[in-house]
């Protein structure tokens, strides 16, 4: 019962945090996505031929939704958890009888909620610019949930390792963004030369974007089962890694 | 169901930080249930490390710590339930309201939301922050923040309250309010462990005193026994007339501070009226007498720094 109430408290606190800060947490993704649709979809996209039967705007929509989900679920956990470490507020949780996996589950669920909330908001905006196709609702929800979980866990890992706020900005800017842009959001894999195709297959974001695109348009450059396994295994690996780091109290408390 | 009488038992506790710093050298002490105990020591003595280990913020290197009989390693969650911690630094989320901070804290201890809200109202009222209940923590004054930390620590109604320098930097009025509040809590049955640099605070509030120095417990006894160890007290005598030479009185150590003030060390057994009489016989009229430091402070300095001259050093000749 203690763990359940503590879990609800963490999720509720994190949920109201990002809702209260909606101008910083929800609105920017909606504006960014609108700009992508206007520039890449309408202006440039209108000059590009159909890709496998879909307009360019329809083709890039799944990737753009996923871009918002990845960034928001990652940023929610990394920003909030590191901020608590930085202010020393994390001590509130560490001295309380809350199990480490409950702390982690609370932060991760809040990250998932933000990622999926923004994902749905961006989907709603996308529907103003293009027709939203969904081939498989089960896969659509599954890959959204799995991706948000994986990215929340990755955000927590970043927050646990970070020593400065610069470290929190480093991974999204220099790792996540390049991986997303090179992860097949804007182009099919076959447009690349064989070397770059092989290199791209090492990018986990490629699998996420393709699995999500498959759930919406039925198009993919990778095997969906492999994509789901990669995301799920990465999430489990991150969970184990984070749990070990959370046991290291001196790492968490001394920023 | 309580497993033991002692609120806190520490046995052979060692802590070595990753950089090799040995913070605690096998310390042992107990705090009885219902006690008001002071944990004293100079900066860097190991007080905060001890508190960090008791409250699970730090991992011990070796030794045993139990809180009301619950081992902090094997019964970690039960041990944590017994403890409320008031840290040295303000560490609440500055963007949350006072009510949110307390209800969240209670939630982490498994207190249902409705009860947590009732408790937040009660404790905010007790510490005089009820009017500020909907203000965000950032907008509170320094004194209010201190009181909020105490209210937060009480949100789950702990049996053991640990306060790490709660009155550092607060004004006299607030300090006295806190003293009164803590005494009331203690009378209601809460065991309190207080670390402080204000030794008059420890003298006024605490029944037992543990002194840590360089990672070792150098004293662990009740206040009266500890003060009895003070073999002499140091007074400042203010004289009416300018002194031409240093007076000599057997058994007393007299040093001149200036031409009108003398520092006089009087042995514990020595009659004070005899001192006044001796000065009279030397035609020295005493205008005023005061203790140089409070007795506990003097003892503390003797224990933690036995080989060095104490501050406020005096001159030997006029």
Image (spheres, grey):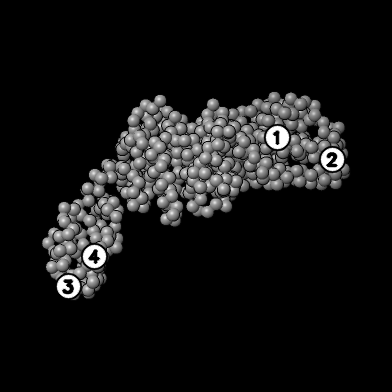
Q: Eyeballing the image, is B275 above or below B59? A: below
Of circles 2 and 1, which is in front?
A: 1
Image quarter where the N terminus of chain B lies is top left
Task: Name the residue carrying label 4.
Answer: B237
Q: Is residue B10 visible?
A: no
Q: Percent x, y for residue B307?
A: 23, 55
Please state the total of marks drawn on the protein image: 4
Q: Are marks 4 and 1 on the same chain?
A: no
Mark 1 chain: A
> Which SS class for mark 2?
helix
At label 2, counting other C-alpha atoms closer than 10 Å, the crowd grade (few under 14, some 14-19, many 20 or more) is some
> Which SS class for mark 3?
loop
Q: Percent x, y for residue A198?
A: 69, 34
Is residue A210 rendered to the left or right of residue B186?
right
Task: Name the residue carrying label 3.
Answer: B245
Task: Name the residue carrying label 1.
Answer: A116
Q: Residue at x 87, y 43 (%)?
A: A46
Q: Are marks 2 and 4 in contact (CB under 8 Å)?
A: no
Q: Eyeballing the image, is B152 above or below B297? A: above
Is residue A159 rendered to the left or right of residue A213?
left
Mark 2 chain: A
Of circles 4 and 1, which is in front?
A: 4
Label 2, label 4: how far apart the Cα atoms are: 90 Å
Q: Quadrant of residue B29?
A: top left
Label 4, label 3: how far apart the Cα atoms are: 15 Å
Q: Residue at x 79, y 44 (%)?
A: A34
Q: Eyeballing the image, is A140 above or below B91? A: above
Task: Name the residue carrying label 2.
Answer: A129
Q: Nearer the viewer, residue B249 or B39?
A: B249
């Amino acid at each position: 019962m203690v763990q359940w109430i503590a879990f609800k408290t963490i999720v509720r606190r994190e949920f109201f945090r990002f809702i209260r800060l909606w101008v910083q947490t929800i609105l920017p993704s909606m504006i960014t996505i609108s700009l992508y649709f206007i520039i890449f979809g309408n202006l440039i996209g209108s000059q590009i031929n159909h890709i496998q039967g879909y307009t360019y705007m329809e083709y890039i929509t799944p990737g753009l939704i996923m871009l918002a989900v990845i960034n928001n679920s990652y940023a929610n956990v990394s920003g909030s958890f590191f901020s608590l470490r930085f202010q020393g507020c994390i001590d509130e949780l560490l001295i309380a009888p809350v199990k480490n996996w409950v702390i982690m589950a609370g932060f991760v669920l809040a990250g998932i909620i933000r990622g999926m909330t923004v994902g749905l908001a961006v989907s709603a905006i996308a529907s103003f610019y293009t027709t939203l196709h969904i081939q498989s609702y089960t896969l659509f929800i599954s890959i959204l949930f799995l991706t948000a979980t994986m990215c929340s866990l990755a955000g927590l890992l970043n927050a646990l390792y970070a020593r400065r706020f610069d470290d929190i900005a480093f991974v999204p800017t220099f790792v996540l963004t390049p991986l997303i842009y090179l992860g097949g959001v804007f182009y099919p894999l076959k447009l690349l030369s064989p070397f770059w195709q092989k290199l791209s297959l090492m990018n986990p974001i490629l699998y996420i974007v393709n699995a999500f695109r498959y759930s919406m348009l039925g198009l993919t450059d990778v095997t969906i089962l492999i994509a789901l396994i990669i995301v799920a295994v990465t999430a489990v690996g991150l969970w184990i890694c984070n749990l070990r780091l959370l046991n290291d109290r001196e790492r968490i408390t001394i920023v | 169901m309580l497993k033991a009488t002692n609120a806190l038992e520490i046995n052979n506790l060692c802590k070595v930080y990753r950089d090799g710093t040995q913070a605690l050298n096998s310390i042992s002490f107990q705090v009885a249930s219902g006690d008001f105990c002071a944990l004293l020591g100079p900066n860097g003595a190991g007080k905060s490390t001890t508190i960090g280990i008791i409250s699970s913020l730090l991992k011990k290197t070796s030794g045993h710590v139990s809180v009301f009989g619950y081992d902090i390693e094997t019964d970690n969650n039960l041990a944590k339930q017994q403890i409320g911690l008031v840290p040295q630094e303000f560490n609440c989320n500055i963007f949350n309201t006072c009510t949110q901070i307390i209800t969240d804290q209670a939630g982490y201890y498994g207190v249902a939301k409705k009860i947590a809200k009732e408790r937040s109202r009660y404790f905010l009222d007790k510490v005089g922050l009820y009017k500020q209940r909907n203000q965000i923590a950032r907008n509170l004054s320094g004194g209010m923040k201190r009181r909020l930390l105490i209210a937060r620590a009480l949100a789950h109604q702990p049996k053991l309250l640990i306060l790490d320098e709660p009155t550092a930097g607060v004004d006299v009025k607030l300090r006295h309010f806190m003293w009164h509040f803590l005494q009331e809590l203690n009378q209601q049955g809460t065991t309190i462990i207080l670390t402080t640099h204000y030794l008059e605070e420890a003298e006024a509030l605490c029944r037992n005193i543990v002194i840590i120095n360089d990672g070792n417990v150098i004293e662990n006894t009740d206040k009266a026994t500890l003060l009895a160890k003070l073999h002499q007290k140091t007074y400042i005598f203010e004289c009416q007339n300018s002194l031409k030479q240093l007076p000599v009185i057997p058994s007393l150590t007299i040093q001149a501070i200036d031409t009108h003030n003398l520092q006089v060390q009087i042995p514990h057994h020595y009659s004070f009226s005899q001192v006044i009489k001796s000065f009279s016989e030397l035609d020295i009229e005493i205008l005023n007498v005061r203790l140089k430091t409070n007795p506990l402070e003097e003892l503390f300095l003797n224990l933690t720094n036995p080989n060095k001259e104490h501050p406020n050093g005096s001159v030997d000749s006029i």
